[in-house]
Image (cartoon, helix red, strand yellow):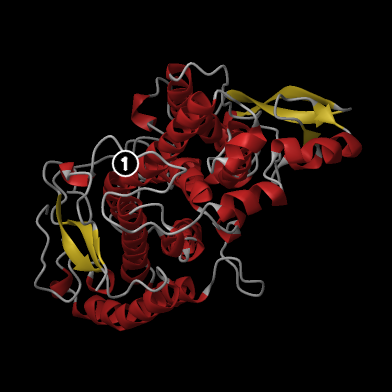
Amino acid sequence: MSSITYSDKIPNNVNLSEDRTLQRALEQWQPNYLKWWGDMGPDDSQNFDVYLRTAISVDPQGWAQFGHVKMPDYRWGIFLNPAEKDRKIHFGDHKGEDAWQDVPGEYRANLRRIIVTQGDTEPASVEQQRHLGLTCPSQYDLRNLFQVNVEEGRHLWAMVYLLHKYFGRDGREEGEALLERRSGQEDNPRILQAFNEETPDWLSFFMFTYFTDRDGKFQLCALAESSFDPLARTTKFMLTEEAHHMFVGESGISRVIQRTCQAMNELKTDDVTKLRAAGVIDLPTLQRYLNFHFSVTIDLFGADESSNAATFYNTGLKGRYEEGKRMDDHQLKGGTYKVLNAVGGQLIEKEVPMLNALNEVLRDDYIKDSIGGVERWNKVIEKAGIPFRLKTPHKAFHRNIGALAQVKVSPDGRVLSEAEWKANVDNWLPSETDRAFVGSLMGRVVEAGKFANWIAPPMMGINRQSADFEYVRFN
């Protein structure tokens, strides 16, 4: 099952040619997808030859090949990890039973909703990022943007395959709707709010790929535990591709920090005005962007108490992050978990049933993982000898979902009055001035081996290519 058929119109490793009805349905969807890509994919880039990796196998060793390809010709396809023989359900009410190869009727609506919500995020991020190529800081970065974009497109294919194969006419209609919604559109927006935000500049893009694609990692890990085997196998392969997206974010911010610290040491100053005049992004502005993207992303995990989360777990649709490594009964009936509530101007922890707190469990796992990367950024600052530390804000800061949406909280976790929040918000979140300044740095650098002034070159090229390798050929 690991080899991929490239002779078919739709590359796949699911024997698509043996299911003529499904193949025809997907071949009818394909032109609509390509039209969406033409309309909403990377702006003014359809004729570039881009050095992209393409999946050629689902074997973890040597699963991709690199080569120059025009993005509309990219071999999007349907790839599932190999089936695990006699796989059993390992959590929830069906623990110990055989994993499902088809959708149980009673869980059909919930499973479809999960797949549609995941599927909707994929084209949304392509739409959010479509103009970024016009202001890229280097060919290397432009190539990374395009790689992220084509893989988000393939992740959409992954979800549409499941909808078409397992959900009949409903699934086909959902597949069409995934191409009709638009990020940020008032009358037909994307399902989750973070995917309706603008990604107007490359600092936002790097923060998005670090924080929001990391949410993708955690959601996909939870779905990779699913009792519905085709979903588990699909998301496992998506995780292989997702790792690069987070690398783009983490290394991108690291390079911005490196360049800023270099300028601070050369100019012997931490004066924001002088650093901005020198054309680099000051560290306090980086902190405000971090605060914004972190807080918007942790809202994606949903309400801190959720009966839906309990239902998805009990019924075996969605597990926890690294479910198999957890030392408990994997049914959680008597367990509790602490969530935060705002009571009388204070943040108070309260115990709730573990099953109802599973969004919060996943959010807390995500926060721990996010802090790891922020600490790696701090090592860059430390190495430069600069006494400044980036921090993830308190999880109650700038929340718009759940109990914490009702209160204003500072990045260090103090509950504030509306007046205090308004007086300080521009110190904590990017102001219009910050965004205008960052926007003013976004010139376009496309000469091979050259980089914009506000970002350092990477330590190593993609696929071990040299610094001046031609990642994009502008025909």
Q: Secondary structure at mark 1?
A: loop
- Residue 46, compared with residue 278, is above or below; it is below
Front one among 261 and 57: 261
- Residue 282, compared with residue 297, is above or below; it is above
Left or right: 199 in relation to 273 = left
Front one among 22 and 281: 281
Dividing the picture into quarters, in which one does residue 146 lie?
bottom left
- The spot of residue 392 in percent (x, y) is 59, 29
- The spot of residue 406 in percent (x, y) is 80, 41
Q: Is residue 130 visible?
A: yes
Left or right: 424 in relation to 455 = right
- Residue 283, compared with residue 99, is above or below; it is above
Front one among 121 and 89: 121
**Where the N terminus falls, by quadrant?**
bottom left
Residue depicted at 29% across the width and 48% down the height: 241
Total number of numbered labels? 1
Q: Which residue is mark 1?
A: 97
Residue depicted at 58% across the width and 57% down the height: 192
Dividing the picture into quarters, in which one does residue 6 lie?
bottom left
Q: Amino acid at mark 1?
A: Glu
Q: Is residue 332 visible?
A: no
- Residue 268, compared with residue 472, is above or below; it is above
